[in-house]
């Protein structure tokens, strides 16, 4: 009996201990969540204060983008429409290229987007196109050149033969491309005509388009604010209605971020389906999470342009597959809980809620209303991206010297303090992060990345995820130096190698673009494009940053 009483006493103590332990864990979790909420609240007001302070300086330097003249109104059309007009002899390529060049010359003094041009050669190319069409081309020839006679610009990190190819670094300030990057070659083969190359941050690695060679590129909606990076030059020209086709690339939001900040559509396709040969000095053979992509005023341009640069791999992406929107299960994620990333502002939360409400009205008996989704991997967006970047073949420190040595972060910081560094503060910050911070634990990062990829891939079988585009609309120039990790909301989808479309959703009260990302599982571009097209119709799509001529009735 004594033994039984002793055992019973021990059992009660064990149960009591377990209850106490469980209570302690619950209290600990509640306390951690409370501290996180307080931290994010502090970050929110800190961000507001930072933007206010920086705006005091930059608002005084704001300049309006010139209004679009009637003779340039054709530039409001999609690239697909322009190509069709040229094929039907309703529009001459020379007239279109002339309009493009004239518009670039009008807006570039305000934007500082163009780093080199080939205007005379582009006009010669356009005249040749007009002669070819006048002499007669077969349907098969037109099919092989779907963008015949349409001008394009490319971010300067894509090599365009004969043009500057500096990558924004002083060590390459006079470097010129000796041949086209593969994506440029493919666009030329499709009939498109290169007109200019545009500004990028050093080696494409920053959230703003600024370097020590060409300076900073300005946002057409507010020239005191950033265009994003690294395709900021392209987005600025496209939003200013100066470039019908804008060739970009994306390794951490470099296509989608400028698209968001400049009110455009942008597609980052499934990684591994576009060649980066000749882009940012790559051979095209390296495994990478980067992809070639485009920004555009029109969602309808994204699939056919991506098909061109995807070449033989285009069928794998099913870009033109017809999709019934009502059959797509929609999920949404209102925020990420990465402590390094700023909290999502109220304007963007409201925009997300409007989209969710709109798509909820489409629910049928075969589908259901949008559902919330979250995974703990989104608590670590930057860490997972940083770990994935460590697997990339390129060396940022070596590329900064044009592979003539290796830049040292601490040394460059000291030189910057006395005005002697060849690099921007942003580049030096990345050097310090790469060289001084400990690496992300590989086993942990690999496991978390894989569980996120598997769970999200399984969830999005036949569906899409609505995700925040950024914590806030385009901030003032240089403000992102104080929040260097915010790009990770875009970067996490590079890590997963999932396709994503950036979708504009009008302007906020300050006249800055709003938007969201629409994400799909690998090779399911058709799903996110279908949702993007629907949202374009429902919310108006691209809103010009200047006055445009009214259409003739």
Image (cartoon, grey):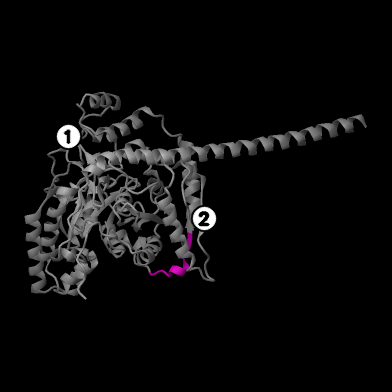
Q: Look at the image and say whether residue 326 sits in the magenta stretch.
A: yes
Q: Nearer the viewer, mark 1 or mark 2?
A: 2
* Quadrant position of residue 20: top right
Q: Which mark is residue 171?
A: 1
Is residue 324 in view from this perspective?
A: yes
Q: Look at the image and say whether residue 105 sits in the magenta stretch.
A: no
Residue 542 vs residue 454, the one in the foreground: 542
Is residue 521 in view from this perspective?
A: no
Q: Is residue 153 left or right of residue 395?
A: left
Q: How many marks?
A: 2
Residue at 15% over, 62% down: 69
Element at badge 2?
A: strand
Element at badge 1?
A: helix
Q: Which residues are magenta?
A: 322-330
Q: Marks 1 and 2, Cα distance to the nearest angstrom?
A: 48 Å
| Position above or below: 218 against 351 | above
x and y, in percent, of residue 356 in the image: 46, 60
């Amino acid at each position: 009996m004594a033994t039984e009483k002793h055992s019973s006493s021990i059992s009660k103590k064990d149960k009591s201990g377990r209850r106490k332990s469980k209570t302690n864990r619950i209290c600990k979790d509640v306390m951690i969540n409370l501290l996180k909420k307080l931290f994010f609240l502090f970050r929110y007001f800190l961000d507001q204060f930072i933007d206010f302070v920086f705006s005091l300086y930059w608002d005084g330097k704001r300049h309006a983008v010139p209004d679009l003249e009637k003779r340039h109104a054709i530039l409001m059309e999609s690239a697909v429409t322009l190509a069709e007009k040229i094929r039907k002899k309703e529009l001459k390529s020379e007239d279109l290229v002339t309009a493009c060049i004239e518009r670039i010359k009008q807006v570039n003094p305000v934007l500082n987007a163009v780093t080199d041009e080939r205007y005379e050669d582009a006009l010669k190319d356009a005249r040749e196109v007009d002669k070819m069409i006048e002499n007669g081309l077969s349907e098969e020839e037109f099919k092989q050149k779907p963008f015949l006679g349409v001008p394009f610009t490319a971010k300067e990190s894509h090599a365009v033969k004969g043009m500057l190819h500096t990558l924004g670094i002083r060590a390459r300030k006079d470097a010129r491309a000796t041949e086209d990057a593969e994506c440029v070659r493919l666009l030329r083969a499709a009939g498109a005509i290169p007109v200019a190359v545009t500004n990028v941050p050093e080696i494409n690695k920053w959230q703003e388009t600024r370097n020590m060679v060409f300076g900073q590129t300005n946002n057409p909606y507010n020239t005191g604010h950033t265009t994003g990076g690294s395709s900021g030059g392209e987005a600025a020209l496209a939003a200013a209605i100066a470039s019908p086709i804008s060739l970009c690339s994306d390794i951490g939001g470099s296509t989608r971020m400028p698209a968001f900040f400049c009110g455009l559509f942008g597609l980052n396709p499934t990684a591994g389906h576009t060649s980066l040969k000749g882009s940012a000095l790559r051979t095209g053979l390296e495994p990478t999470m980067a992809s070639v992509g485009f920004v555009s005023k029109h969602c309808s341009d994204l699939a056919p342009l991506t098909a061109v640069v995807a070449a033989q791999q285009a069928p794998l992406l099913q870009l033109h597959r017809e999709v019934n929107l009502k059959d797509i299960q929609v999920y949404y994620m209102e925020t990420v809980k990465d402590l390094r990333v700023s909290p999502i502002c109220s304007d963007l939360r409201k925009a997300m809620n409007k989209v969710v409400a709109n798509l909820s009205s489409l629910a049928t008996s075969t589908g259901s209303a949008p559902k919330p989704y979250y995974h703990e991997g989104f608590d670590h967006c930057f860490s997972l991206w940083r770990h994935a970047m460590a697997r990339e073949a390129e060396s940022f420190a070596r590329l900064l010297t044009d592979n003539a040595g290796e830049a040292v972060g601490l040394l460059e910081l000291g030189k910057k303090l006395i005005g002697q560094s060849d690099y921007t503060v942003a580049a030096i910050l990345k050097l310090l992060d790469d060289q001084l911070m400990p690496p992300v634990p590989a086993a942990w990062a690999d496991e978390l990345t894989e569980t996120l990829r598997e769970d999200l891939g399984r969830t999005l079988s036949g569906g899409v995820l609505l995700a925040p585009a950024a914590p806030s609309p385009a901030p003032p120039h240089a403000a992102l130096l104080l929040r260097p990790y915010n790009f990770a909301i875009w970067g996490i989808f590079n890590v997963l190698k999932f396709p994503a479309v950036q979708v504009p959703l009008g302007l906020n009260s300050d006249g800055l673009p709003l938007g969201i990302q629409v994400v799909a599982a690998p090779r399911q571009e058709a799903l996110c494009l279908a949702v993007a097209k629907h949202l374009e119709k429902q919310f108006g799509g691209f809103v010009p940053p200047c006055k445009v001529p009214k259409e003739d009735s």
